[in-house]
Amino acid sequence: MLPEVIKIGGIEYRVKLVDACDEDNLNIDGKILFPNQEIRVKKGLEKQYGENILLHEIIHGIFEFCGWDQDEENVTRLSNALYQVLKDNNVFKER
Ligand SMILES: [Zn+2]
């Protein structure tokens, strides 16, 4: 179950499960639309894959917030690495 809202840099992005994230490219599984304050994730994805897609879009949002170039390779590397570390170590679990 993905969160409904993700707050990045004071802006709340609604997380929407959609049939098509981008009407012009049906191969895209996630997309962040900054002016719409919206993160789209394709419906029906497997759990971990969908979580990874959401984290990827969140990283795009963080890059935007920080004023960094939206370098797709860096976003992918960072989101993949973060997903593994956060998931495998239960970093924020109540102890
Ligand atoms: Zn991307």
Image (spheres, rainbow, N blue to C red):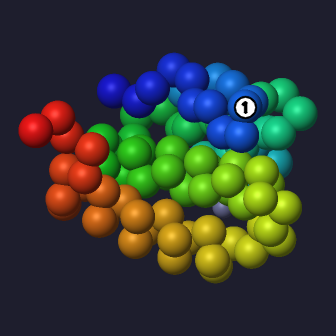
Element at label 1? loop
Q: Residue at x 34, y 27 (%)?
A: 1
Is residue 40 left or right of 48 when viewed as pictured? Answer: right
Vertical relation: 90 (above or below) 2? below
Q: Is residue 9 left or right of residue 68?
A: left
Outermost residue toward the right in this view: 35
Amino acid beneath label 1: Gly
Residue in front for this viewpoint, 41 or 82? 82
Identify the residue at horizontal 77%, vertical 51% (top origin). Answer: 65
Residue 19, image x and y in percent?
59, 30
In front of the other: 22 or 74 = 74
Task: Give the residue at the far front of this rendering.
Answer: 95
> Which quadrant of the view contains residue 81?
bottom left
Give 59 or 2, whichever is nearer the viewer. 59
Q: For mark 1, what is the residue?
A: 10
Whether residue 61 sits left or right of residue 82 in the image: it is right
* Residue 2 appears in the rendering: yes
Image quadrant, ligand 1: bottom right
Residue shown at 19% from the left, 50% from the top: 90
Q: Position of residue 18 (x, y in %)?
A: 60, 28
Q: For residue 26, say whether it is visible.
A: no
Count of marks overlaid on the render: 1
